[in-house]
Amino acid sequence: MNSLRRLDIKYVKGIGPKRAELLAKELNIHTAYDLLHHFPTSYVDRTSIYTIREFEGDMPSVQVKGRFINFNVLGEGAKTRLVGIFTDGSATMEVVWFQGIKRIRESLHTSTEYILFGKPTTFNARWQMSHPEVDTLEKAATQIGLRGVYPLTEKLRDRNIGSRQLHDWICELLNSRPPFAESLPATVVEECKLMSLDKAIRELHKPSAPASLAKARERMKFEELFYIQTDMLMRSRDRKSVTEGFRFTSIGRYFNNFYSTCLPFPLTGAQKRVIKEIRIDTNTGRQMNRLVQGDVGSGKTLVALMSMLIAIDNGFQACLMAPTEILAGQHYETIRSLAAPIGVNVRLLTGSTRSRERQEIHEALASGELHILIGTHAILEDPVKFRNLGLAVIDEQHRFGVAQRARLWAKNTCPPHILVMTATPIPRTLAMTVYGDLDVSIIDELPPGRKPVTTLLRYDSKREEVYRAIGRQLAEGRQVYFVYPLIDENEKLDLRSLTEGYDLICETFSNYRVAFVHGRLKPAEKDYQMELFASGKAQILVATTVIEVGVNVPNATIMLIENAERFGLSQLHQLRGRVGRGANQSYCILMSKLKIAKETRERLELMTQTSDGFVIAEADMRMRGPGDIEGTMQSGIPFELHIANLATDGEIISQARHAAERMLDADPTLSQPTNRAFLIALKEAVSRSTDWSRIS
């Protein structure tokens, strides 16, 4: 396989330099290895031949055998088309081409029998196929069976490079190669009962049977995930044994004073457990790399602050980096209010920070006067130099690129300890890949006094009843969020918008002040509107999902989410976390149309049944697929996935993880003869990507 990684695609028969350049640009296919690993996303069945009389309804692509009766070129200019009348003896149909007319007309004859493969459609009450695949009987015989449908782009199709063309090039490559040598250790292939690499690749492109194709897909998914798991485990083990870190040896006055005089509420057992794990990590002399997962409202920020106080007690500085200015500002207000009474100097640095204030922060950092810096990616800028950064906290790490996170390492001569926080629950098997090289802590308890949020599903027909209930909460002095999926009305989407909702809310609740926030507001206006609500001057906040993170108003006890059917479960869960932050019973009302799909209703009903973020995340992945989660998560792993799916291949992820652990337990450096070939392949794969092997 390594030789194929170095074989330029232009040397594959039939491709050449121009097509190679196009394949590289459109599909990121540069080498023969890339081409062989451009796997079909689906398959069509070329085993059956239909008659035209059997065509009905919305059929998939099918095969039909017969002859052309005649051809005619119709239309002029851009509307020119070639129309052939085709018969199979049972009936006739039109076959239409809009491109390559001259070439196609010269290649087809009325005296030859052909097999056509395409999707039947009706036009003017007559069956028709547009641009079908056309083969002689001899050529069609090589296409019988399952045929792969390959991912393509419009530009490739415009250049007459279709799924069939890719398949032919791949077959040419497969037919010219000897059997592929096994890439995985023989013990792994045997223990996991995997198909051989050679058979798996050939089956994926030229399946012999559905069962064999399924085994081939399983083998190649396992291979991709096994490479990732082995690489992550080796990194993690190497970091724990090699990468030096600052040693936080003592608990001093800052931590003790805060614990005895400023703690807003008793720590939960989960918070105590996580702080203890962090305490142990930072006293080993090795760099800490720990992920703290905790549901919204579970007290992650307090754990982060107490960890930063440990760093300060040992003569170090700390920083907290958040993905948005709103969230960074929220962390700043929270941490400053908690830590200022014990003399901790906390500052905020974002893209909006004025030049004079920015200069003050730079000077205070360099002198060591500034203990904790909270901010956005502005913290990563070159002028930001710490005197002695010992702990970096990253909130919602998946929203930062790996290269951005890597710049934190350059903020001290020895890499600071890394504490990653996320309120986005990640299913266990996905976390195994996304955060596979981090030690994981989970805060699975709510602070005392917090009551679980009651979630209700209500349909538009019950709107007046819902508004009356909201009015009663407002009369008791509570505050309310109204969340909308759109800012403005959209004729194509039958959804409620913030602009029309704002007018309705102002009219319905005319005795109360209404604030509003959305993504198009300028930062100053957004801050002003948020402050109206946070201070209690406004009792109602009408918003889009910009409030998904970074808003903490304990007096807000109701959130009404309009068109809840349009949101994913994880996003609904994040929004719901904005209420229930005080001691009063809180409610999240999911407003939906009555006529929604069964699957959508099941999603919304699940929200009313559980507040467990991990249960919801698992369900969201199962129902909606990986979506953005897989995209953002995959950016943190060093290999491109061609066939494995981080969201749906949980069982294979676990299998690959356990197999990698067994292999490394027996041979930590992969130096044994049975593992050397795999080690070479692993190094080759890692070298093709940016080496983030020592970056959190």
Image (cartoon, rainbow, N blue to C red):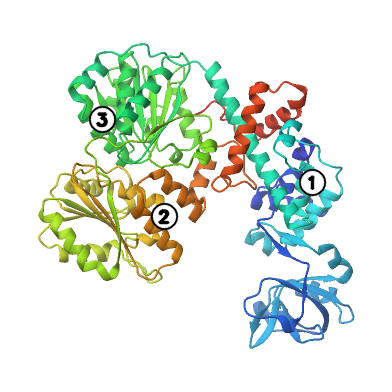
Within 10 Å of the Cα at label 2, are there few (<14), some (14-19), or many (20+) other Cα atoms?
some
Instruction: Provide the secondary structure element on which disc 1 rests.
Output: helix
Between 216 and 282, the one lying in front of the other is 216
Instruction: Provide the secondary structure element on which disc 3 rests.
Output: helix
Residue 495 appears left or right of 236: left
Labels 3, 2: front one: 2
Residue shown at the point (43%, 22%) measured from the top left: 417
Residue shown at the point (73%, 72%) measured from the top left: 62
Residue underneath mark 2: 568
Within 10 Å of the Cα at label 1, are there few (<14), some (14-19), or many (20+) other Cα atoms?
some
- Residue 185 - label: none
Residue 639 screen position, x and y as percent: 62, 38
**Proximity of marks 3 and 2: CB atoms separated by less than 8 Å:** no
Residue underneath mark 3: 335
Residue 451 screen position, x and y as percent: 24, 43
Q: Which one is earlier in the sequence, the residue at label 1 or at label 3?
A: 1
Instruction: Provide the secondary structure element on which disc 2 rests.
Output: loop
Between 472 and 21, the one lying in front of the other is 472
Q: CA distance from mark 3 to mark 2?
A: 31 Å
Residue 696 appears left or right of 255: right
Within 10 Å of the Cα at label 3, are there few (<14), some (14-19), or many (20+) other Cα atoms?
many
Residue shown at the point (54%, 21%) measured from the top left: 239
Between 506 and 45, the one lying in front of the other is 45
Q: Residue 658, relative to residue 205: is it above or below?
A: above
Q: Residue 11, relative to residue 441: is it above or below?
A: below
Residue shown at the point (23%, 25%) measured from the top left: 339
Residue 88 falls in image quadrant? bottom right
* Residue 343 in view here: no
Residue 372 falls in image quadrant? top left
Q: Residue 599, relative to residue 346: is it above or below?
A: below
Residue underneath mark 1: 199
Given the image, on which type of amino acid does mark 1 rest?
A: Lys
